[in-house]
């Protein structure tokens, strides 16, 4: 064993149904975690990787039953992983709102990242894998910001992952978020179309801004309730850019309450003074076709306690309260 890692032996791996149609390079990257991409592409280029004893290219598509020869490579020694505790596993399992043989959907709590990294020992996907050691395949279909709560899809089969990600690419999956924004959102403003550009601050933190050099982005809006000083809106992203709803809302002059990245300091301080404890953005509903059957599905997720309590507090405050939802409706969304 070297200081860098361990030298593996030659392996022959049979391609399963879940990997049918997968590219050779992607298959190898999953099999050889910890091995640099440059090494993976080099062993393919040199002919050391064989499929059914024949040479292949990185973009060769595998078929169920294929025999893949994986040559000896040096893999980094695995660090001892910090396993999620039983309590956090139970919390995540109890947050599952839908599950079948192909996928599951979780009402992710605010404050939990979807995956580990960047100083985090684990995220939602690692917790689910720890809670289901028998599960052969669990992968995120899409992502949510750490501070955003609500519905997120997880595939239990590679075929389901391919199907759902293809549906996302073709904009056939509809996502509807509920956001509490500062000020009175004008009912006439039902969409924000502004290109978004990702950039980094000097400390390495990633941000997004409206910029003509950015990618085309569109979010549709519908006012649900107007309170004194705030509005509850439904925001439905047509495109899927990083921080899209947060930046589009701020660009429209109505940043999301509790947003420490895109809300001005005075407004953020005022929200905190009212007892605001979180980013007021919740992935409330998903509309999609089920993998396999194609049956139409709509799922909704109740608010967590901090989100629901804040709305109830605003509903009881004197002032504007023009609404398509009353305080009882809000309470139902939180507890149902």
Image (cartoon, rainbow, N blue to C red):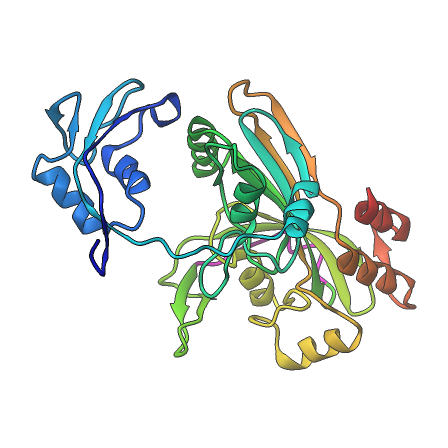
The residue closer to the viewer here, 323 or 161, is: 161
The answer, for residue 325, to whether it is visible in the render is no
Residue 158 lies, in percent from the top left, at 42, 30
Position above or below: 116 against 28:
below
For the question of whether residue 86 can be seen, the reply is yes
Residue occupying the far bottom of the picture: 266
- Residue 43 lies left or right of residue 168; in this view the side is left
Q: Examine the rendered structure and indicate whether residue 313 appears above or below residue 46.
A: below
Q: Residue at x 24, y 38 (%)?
A: 25
Query: 18 or 181, which lies in front?
Result: 18
Name the spot of residue 251 as percent of width and height, x first.
56, 66
Asked which quadrant contains residue 301, the reply is top right
User: In the image, which residues are magenta?
Assistant: 185-195
Question: Where residue 167 sits: x, y (%)?
Answer: 47, 32
Q: Is residue 309 magenta?
A: no
Q: Is residue 187 left or right of residue 194?
A: right
Q: Residue at x 53, y 38 (%)?
A: 154
Please, which residue is most extreme toward the front here?
Answer: 1
Q: Residue furthest left?
A: 46
Magenta span: chief secondary structure: loop
Q: Can residue 194 be found in the magenta stretch?
A: yes
The residue at the point 53 percent across, 26 percent down is 102
Screen quadrant of the C terminus? top right
Q: Position of residue 303 (x, y in %)?
A: 75, 51
Please count the marks in the image.
0
Looking at the picture, tell me which residue is in the foreground, 258 or 91.
91
- In the rendered image, which quarter is residue 5 located in? bottom left
Give the vertical position of 288 relative to 314 (above or below): above
* In front of the other: 122 or 226: 122
Q: Position of 11 compared to 130: left or right?
A: left
């Amino acid at each position: 064993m070297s200081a860098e890692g361990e030298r593996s032996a030659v392996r022959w791996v049979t391609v399963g149904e879940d990997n049918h149609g997968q590219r050779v390079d992607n298959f190898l990257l999953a099999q050889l975690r910890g091995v640099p991409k440059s090494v993976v592409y080099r062993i393919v280029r040199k002919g050391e990787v064989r499929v059914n004893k024949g040479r292949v290219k990185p973009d060769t598509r595998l078929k169920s039953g294929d025999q893949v020869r994986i040559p000896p490579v040096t893999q980094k020694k695995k660090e001892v992983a910090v396993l999620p505790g039983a309590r956090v596993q139970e919390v995540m399992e109890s947050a599952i709102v839908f599950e079948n043989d192909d996928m599951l959907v979780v009402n992710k709590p605010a404050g939990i990242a979807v995956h580990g990294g960047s100083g985090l020992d684990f995220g939602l996907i690692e917790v689910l894998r720890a809670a289901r050691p028998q599960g052969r395949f669990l992968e995120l279909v899409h992502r949510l910001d750490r501070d955003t709560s609500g519905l997120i899809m997880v595939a239990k089969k590679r075929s389901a992952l391919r199907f759902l990600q293809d549906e996302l690419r073709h904009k056939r999956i509809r996502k509807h978020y509920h956001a509490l924004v500062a000020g009175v959102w004008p009912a006439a403003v039902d969409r924000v179309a502004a290109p978004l550009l990702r950039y980094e601050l000097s400390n390495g933190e990633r941000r997004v801004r409206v910029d003509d050099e950015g990618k085309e982005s569109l979010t549709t809006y519908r006012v649900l309730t107007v309170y004194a000083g705030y509005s509850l809106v439904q925001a439905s992203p047509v495109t899927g850019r990083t921080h899209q709803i947060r930046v589009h809302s701020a660009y429209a002059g109505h940043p999301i309450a509790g947003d420490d990245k895109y809300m001005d300091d005075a407004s953020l301080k005022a929200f905190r003074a009212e007892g605001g404890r979180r980013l007021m953005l919740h992935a409330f509903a998903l509309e999609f076709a089920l993998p396999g059957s194609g049956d139409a599905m709509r799922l909704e997720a109740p608010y967590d306690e901090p989100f629901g309590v804040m709305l109830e507090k605003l509903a009881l405050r004197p002032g504007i309260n023009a609404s398509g939802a009353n305080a009882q409706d809000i309470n139902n969304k939180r507890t149902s």
